[in-house]
């Protein structure tokens, strides 16, 4: 199951660190979507609910500014633009089918924002596991691939390994920077874990 923010992608478009088609597009700052598609195009019982508070300076959805192109570029261009730490932004995926939850699964979180100057810190958490990463502007003018983010390595995705259960909630919290944000471009659930 894959979720992408802002821009609708055609079913045949392939994106992600683990290349896959059939991304489920979510195009507003809050809402819900049921019957999420799996990577083979079949419909599942899974659903997604997401929320990021808008503000006077942000509609809580935004874009990086890459020239539009199908696949990875389109997926990474738009994002849920979390501007608040109280409450933080959330994406909850529920009712995952048993075929995906037996033995656990990995959750890839794609996170690149339109940082034009300075450095911003972002904190993401699922359950008791959290990662704080940073992004320094300006963003590249072209999407050039995926880099796993680490405390001292700026990147554009993180991985929560060995998540269990039929549901989980990702929280996205602005951590630092003059203009605080915590972008969520998309989520990708990978089973079996460690693949």
Image (tube, helix red, strand yellow):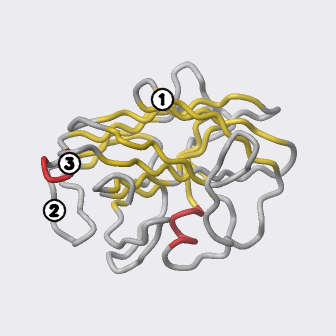
- In the picture as drawn, the residue positioned furthest to the right comes out as 118
Q: Nearer the viewer, residue 144 or 164?
A: 164
Label 1, on which residue? 129
The percent position of residue 50, horizontal first and vertical second, equals 39, 39
Find out whether the residues at labels 3 and 2 contact each other: C-beta distance under 8 Å.
no
Q: Residue at x 64, y 60 (%)?
A: 147
Label 1 sits on a secondary structure element that is strand
Q: What residue is at 65 percent from the left and 31 percent from the top?
A: 174
Residue 160's x, y, as percent? 45, 42
152 sits to left or right of 30: right
Q: Earlier in the sequence, mark 1 or mark 3?
A: 3
**What is the quadrant of the N terminus in the image?**
bottom left
Camera-side residue of 192 and 25? 192
Of circles 1 and 3, the one toward us is 1
Q: Is residue 55 above or below residue 146?
A: above
Return the x and y of residue 176 as percentages of the image width and height. Answer: 75, 29
Q: Residues within 10 Å of mark 3 (few under 14, many from 20)?
A: some
Residue 145, image quadrant = bottom right
Question: Which badge, 1 or 2, comes first in the chain's sequence?
Answer: 2
User: In the displayed structure, would residue 57 be above or below residue 84?
Assistant: below
Task: Give the quadrant of the C terminus.
Answer: bottom left
Quickly name the residue at label 3.
Answer: 46
Which circle, 1 or 2, is nearer the viewer? Answer: 1
Pointer 2: what residue? 43
- Residue located 22% across and 45% down the image: 103
Residue located 77% across and 70% down the image: 141
Structural distance between the alpha carbons of marks 3 and 2: 8 Å
11 vs 173, left or right, is left
Within-10-Å neighbours for mark 1: few <14, some 14–19, many 20+: few
> The residue tagged with tag 3: helix, strand or loop?
loop
Look at the numbered disc 2 and give the secondary structure of its residue.
loop
């Amino acid at each position: 199951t894959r979720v992408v923010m802002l821009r609708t992608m055609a079913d045949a478009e392939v994106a992600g660190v683990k290349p896959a088609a059939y991304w489920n597009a979510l195009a507003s700052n809050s809402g819900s979507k049921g019957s999420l598609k799996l990577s083979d195009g079949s419909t599942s019982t899974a659903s997604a609910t997401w929320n990021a508070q808008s503000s006077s300076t942000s509609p809580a959805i935004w874009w990086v500014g890459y020239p539009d192109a199908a696949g990875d570029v389109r997926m990474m261009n738009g994002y849920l633009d979390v501007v608040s730490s109280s409450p933080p932004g959330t994406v909850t995926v529920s009712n995952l089918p048993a075929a995906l939850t037996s033995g656990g699964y990995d959750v890839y979180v794609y996170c690149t924002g339109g940082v034009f100057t300075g450095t911003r810190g972002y904190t993401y958490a699922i359950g008791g596991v959290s990662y704080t990463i940073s992004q320094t502007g300006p963003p590249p003018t072209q999407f050039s691939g995926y880099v796993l983010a680490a405390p001292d390595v700026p990147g554009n995705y993180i991985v929560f390994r060995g998540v269990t259960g039929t549901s989980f909630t990702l929280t996205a919290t602005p951590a630092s920077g003059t203009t605080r944000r915590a972008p969520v471009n998309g989520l990708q659930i990978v089973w079996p874990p460690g693949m």
